[in-house]
Image (cartoon, helix red, strand yellow):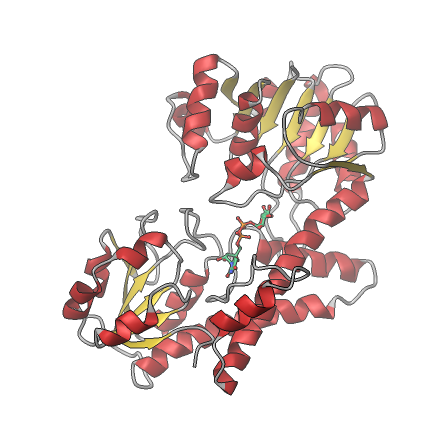
Amino acid sequence: MGKIAVIGTGYVGLTTGACFAHLGHDVICADIDERKIAKLNKGEIPIHEPGLDRIVHEGRDTGKLLFVLGAEAAARHCEFVYLCVPTPEGADGSADLSYIEAAARQIGPVLPADAVVINKSTVPVGSTRVVERALGRSDVAVVSNPEFLREGSAVNDFLKPDRVVIGADDQSAAVRVASLYVGVPAPLMVTDPASAETIKYACNAFLATKLSFVNAVAAICEAVGADVKDVILGMGYDRRIGHEFLKPGPGWGGSCFPKDSKALIRIAEDHGYDFHLMRGVVSVNEEQFERTAEKVVQMAGGSVDGVKIGAWGIAFKANTDDVRESPALEILGRLARQGAIVRAYDPAVSSPMDDFEVVTDPYAACEGADVLIVLTEWDEFKWLDMDKVRDLMAEPRVVDARNLLDRSALQRRGFSYVGIGRA
Ligand code: UGA
């Protein structure tokens, strides 16, 4: 089994490292954040990700998973080095490669002969070349191996992926990277680096397009008196469309879709193609934040100035504590700026927020509230005592931006209910 270094212990890096150790490889994970490494060395997991704690502990117990400070310390003795550092959105919408380049410059001088450096971060087409230059090593191959894992099901997505994509010019390096995935039941494809990098962006862009499309269909449903729940069910039975990723919501967010959509628009522009379809997808999403906030305003009687709003959900989706580019922050921020007094609850988020108060109990969010808005599709919201919620609220009014709650049961209890795409 190969010895693997993983640089960066965020969602992607920590999941990659722990899963490779679970598959039997010797793995050293590195980060520049001293506190994070200290925590990991005590067996504490810095993120909320189902199943991750179990395999991190397993790796520590078997000695197959180590954590060290700094990229050089990890890369020095490793045949494979995975780069899993962030590629945030730069000022002009393009992906900022400075973390990747810095990591590559650090490890270049210490890598053993014939090592393979693998890009797992989502990077613009052509970044394999950027890493090659920053490494400055002609004997080291650079390979693209994009990740497709979703937060909230990252471990499962890594161990049972739909496919593994490897982009390499050097076929022997591709075969060596492929060998790391022995035991993973998935089709494995080898292509060139530019195609592998494009596959990753095109997938996220396509999924974001599907979501903006269904949010637009939801708006049409509201206008024509159709019910989007039935519309997506009827659409999804068509196998060419499928049921997955077809749920309307408050808009899409997270650490990937917003930045990757903008980066792909930028990549296209830089290469002379105006990706106006994708620009439309992004602007439909911004409209969706506005449309959702407006539902609350309408339900409150036309203004939210001084109005108490309860919110369930802060994370960008269920089963994660990640609030990066969360639609909930967009929408609650808009309401707060119009004078609303917002108290929000999320099962996985307790840190303070700029625009509103965060409470640690779902019922506390409803106390005295004029409107309750559901923003994240946590399963536990379905099982709360809605009689108690009605009695706590000043007015029993719900905006259900995930179509999560049982509309007829709420209406029977005296709630006014507005969902997404339902007349
Ligand atoms: C996304 C992709 O799904 C992964 O394949 C990819 O690897 C990852 O980005 C990445 O580039 O690293 P993730 O950001 O974890 O994963 O989130 P998703 O599960 O894709 O959800 C994105 C947004 O779409 C969320 O705001 C979610 O609530 C929303 N969504 C999703 C809907 O509104 N409706 C749906 O039916 C599905």
Choose between 360 and 239: the one closer to the eye.
239
Q: Where is residue 149 in the image (x, y as percent from the top left)?
A: 57, 42
Choose between 80 and 231: the one closer to the eye.
231
Choose between 192 and 158: the one closer to the eye.
158
Choose between 251 and 340: the one closer to the eye.
251
Q: In which quarter of the image is the N terminus?
A: top right
Judge whether residue 126 can be spotted in this image: no
Residue at the spot x=51%, y=63% of the render?
A: 247
Residue at the spot x=80%, y=44% of the render?
A: 194
How many marks on residues?
0
Q: Where is residue 187 in the image (x, y as percent from the top left)?
A: 71, 37
**Depicted 229 relative to depicted 131: above or below:** below
**Depicted 339 relative to depicted 275: above or below:** below
Q: In which quarter of the image is the C terminus?
A: bottom left
Judge whether residue 128 can be spotted in this image: yes
Q: In this view, does 150 lie to the left or right of 344?
A: right
Residue at the spot x=76%, y=47% of the render?
A: 125
Residue 164: quarter of image = top right
Q: Where is residue 352 in the image (x, y as percent from the top left)?
A: 31, 52
Q: Where is residue 286 in the image (x, y as percent from the top left)?
A: 54, 70
**Depicted 116 relative to depicted 169: above or below:** above
Residue at the spot x=57%, y=22% of the render?
A: 23
Residue 384: quarter of image = bottom left
Q: In this view, does 203 lie to the left or right of 414?
A: right
